Amino acid sequence: DARARDDDLLETLTLVFAASGAAFGAFADLLAARWPRHADCASRSTDWRTVAVLAAGLLAFAALVLRWQEPRDQLVLGVYFAALIVLLATDLDQRLLPDLLTLPLIAYTLVVLLLGWNPLLAGKDLAALSAIAAGIGAPAVLVLTSRVFGGGLGMGDVKMLAMVGAFIGWKLALVTLMMASLSGSVIGVLLIATKRGDMKYALPFGTFLALGAALAATIGPEALRWYLGLW
């Protein structure tokens, strides 16, 4: 029947998008191993970073088709997810979030906002104000906490969070910071427990910002409702 055909189509699209995301993740890892700092084209071999970025691409693009069915929404968010995957790859490989990506993406988020094409903010009251407040406020919070606690924050992290905040609004920007901090803490504890790092080991925070931003876009509203429900 019609419902069965729709389910079959969704399953097929999910597999196609997941495979495309995995392929893009592999490409992003290949790119990060050569650009922007590896001017001599020297490259590392495939390692755990390749697997991490490939898995991130697979999951992000599978979530894209499961969560949003409108082609324009998929396109707008597909660009966003693709950018996060490349930033994840460059930060893992080089601890670098290139201006060549973050600055045009800030402009992209503003254009999408002005056109009213952002599905994460569509239909919400004061969407533009939320985006602008998050684009300015979230990086300010990050800078303040870094100064207070002595974190190794880079300007790439600030620009990336400005882009993320302007794209997803202030509520999901808070979810992004929470998920990034939580995932960073978990990985840090695991590194210490396995004696692969210590308390002075500097984790690339942009990596966790990318993960937190992708999670906030896909499950952020549900995570926020669950958290608020605890109180």
Image (cartoon, helix red, strand yellow):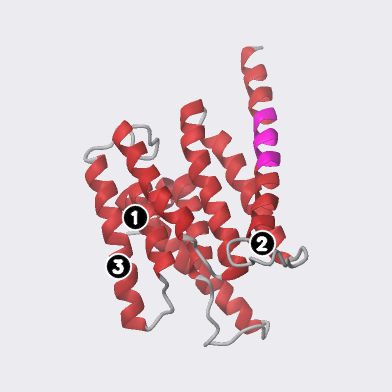
Q: Is residue 83 above or below residue 68?
A: below
Which quadrant is the C terminus positioned in?
bottom left
Instruction: First in sequence, mark 2 or 3: give its number.
Output: 2
The Cα–Cα distance between marks 2 and 3, rounded to whole angstroms, is 33 Å
User: Residue 208: within the magenta?
Assistant: no
- Looking at the image, is mark 2 or mark 1 earlier in the sequence? 2
* Secondary structure mostly seen in the magenta stretch: helix
Residues 139 and 213: in front is 139
Q: Nearer the viewer, residue 127 or 11?
A: 127
In the rendered structure, which segment of residues is drawn in magenta? 12-20
Q: Amino acid at mark 3?
A: Val
First along the sequence among labels 3 and 1: 3
Residue at mark 2? 34
Q: Are marks 2 and 1 in contact (CB under 8 Å)?
A: no
Residue located 40% across and 54% down the image: 103
Q: Quadrant of residue 17?
A: top right
Q: Secondary structure at mark 2?
A: loop
Horizontally, is 13 left or right of 128 in the view?
Answer: right
Residue 152 figure quarter? bottom left
Name the kind of residue labelled 1 in the image. Leu
- Pointer 1 local density, CA inside 10 Å: few below 14, some 14–19, many at least 20: few
Foreground tag (2 vs 3)? 2
What residue is pinned by disc 1?
A: 228
Q: Which residue is mark 3?
A: 141
Left or right: 11 in relation to 223: right
Question: Which numbered tag is attached to residue 146?
Answer: none
Name which quarter of the figure residue 136 lies in: bottom left
Q: Which residue occupies 42% across, 49% down? A: 104
Query: Residue 145: x and y, percent?
Result: 33, 75
